[in-house]
Amino acid sequence: MASEAVVFPVPGPNGERQVRISSPGRVLWPEPGITKLDLANYMADVGQAFVTANGDRPLALQRFPGGIEGEQFFSKNPPKGAPDYVRSVMVSYPSARSHPQLVIDEPAAAVWAVQMNTIVFHPWPSRAEDSDNPDQLRIDLDPQPGTDFDDAIPAAQELRSVLEEAGLTGFIKTSGNRGLHVYAPIKPTHEFLDVRHAVIAAAREVERRMPDKVTTAWWKEERGERIFLDFNQANRDRTIAGAYSPRALPHASVSCPIEWDELERVSPKDFTIATVPDRLKTVGDPWADMHAKPGTIDTLLGWWDRDCANGLGEMPFPPDYPKMPGEPPRVQPSRARKQD
């Protein structure tokens, strides 16, 4: 049974905030028995690292009012009744419409989001005051059926090398599920489409070097048993679970930053709501200084131009996007062959 509300103290840069947590005993993860209050404690414990990674960015909340086994929905506009220390910023979506989106600036705001039944946090790759120009290049390494986390490791290592050749420093985290996320800090000098092209250029270079292990094929029927380098996560209003964000999976995993030299000896299940706070205390935050020396995407854009000149052009966009210039037909390859 869920118990009555409690007032939860959360330290932060502006002093201690008092955040009300209703139904603190509600079980969100049945398997480990993790409650809403447990989640609030977790967010407070990792609060500074969470804000360093996800703060000052437009943010979407993935909310689960009944726990991970119940209904869920995405909340982009700030929920009604937000406290005065939770702000919002206007952003533009692919539809060309603009809406306010939540921004988190301190740990108390993240704990308040837990009060609003948020489990997964989805930050944009751009800053609140410059939301049109990403300051992070992100690539999602997604194991396809027949592959797993161990198969994503060599792909991530090769991607790191490719980024280094392009003058970029790669940072890595577990996705919280089976995959890996690689980020590179960049100067916010290009808009989303340019950054997407840079991601595609990097992904194609990895694919050339590991054609039997990785793929950039958008259509699932063409991917085979390979790691998919998901370039479409680089689009405007496309997000992945943020660093230190919980995931709505049975074991209460967390999308956790790691050092590159840890990659071959960890498992995604090592990083959970129960284990990550102690990890931060003992190991520290591998992403604390991510943005100290951002690079540029100029070299990758040169690779993009080279590939276009060699006949490799635009790739498909997500199905809810408007038709984009140079985009190939949005027809499943097998269906296209039947039509021919």
Image (cartoon, helix red, strand yellow):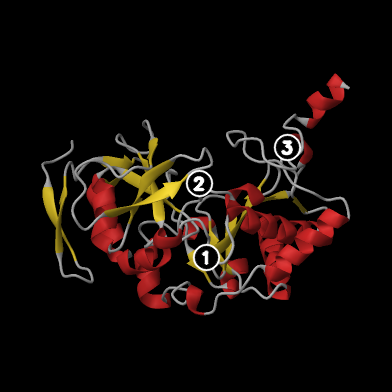
Count of numbered tags? 3
Secondary structure type for disc 3? loop
- Mark 2 / mark 1, whichever is N-terminal: 1
Left or right: 248 with respect to 334?
Answer: left
Q: Which residue is mark 2?
A: 237
Q: Are marks 3 and 1 in contact (CB under 8 Å)?
A: no
Q: Nearer the viewer, mark 2 or mark 3?
A: 2
Residue 340, image quadrant = top right
- Mark 3 / mark 1, whichever is N-terminal: 1
- Name the residue rendered at 75%, 30% in the picture: 332
Secondary structure type for disc 1? loop
- Mark 2 / mark 3, whichever is N-terminal: 3
Residue 294, image quadrant = bottom right
Q: CA distance from mark 2 to mark 3?
A: 21 Å
Q: Nearer the viewer, mark 3 or mark 1?
A: 1
The amino acid type, in three-letter code, at marker 1 is Asp
Q: Which residue is mark 3?
A: 219
The amino acid type, in three-letter code, at marker 3 is Trp
The amino acid type, in three-letter code, at marker 2 is Asp
Report x, y in % for residue 158: 73, 66
Report x, y in % for residue 47: 31, 64
Q: Residues within 10 Å of mark 3 (few under 14, many from 20)?
A: few
Is 242 placed above or below 15 here?
Answer: above
Viewport quadrant of the N terminus: top left
Report x, y in % for residue 286: 48, 73
Q: Residues within 10 Å of mark 2 (few under 14, many from 20)?
A: some
In this orientation, which residue lies closer to the viewer: 196 or 129? 129
Left or right: 49 with respect to 223?
Answer: left
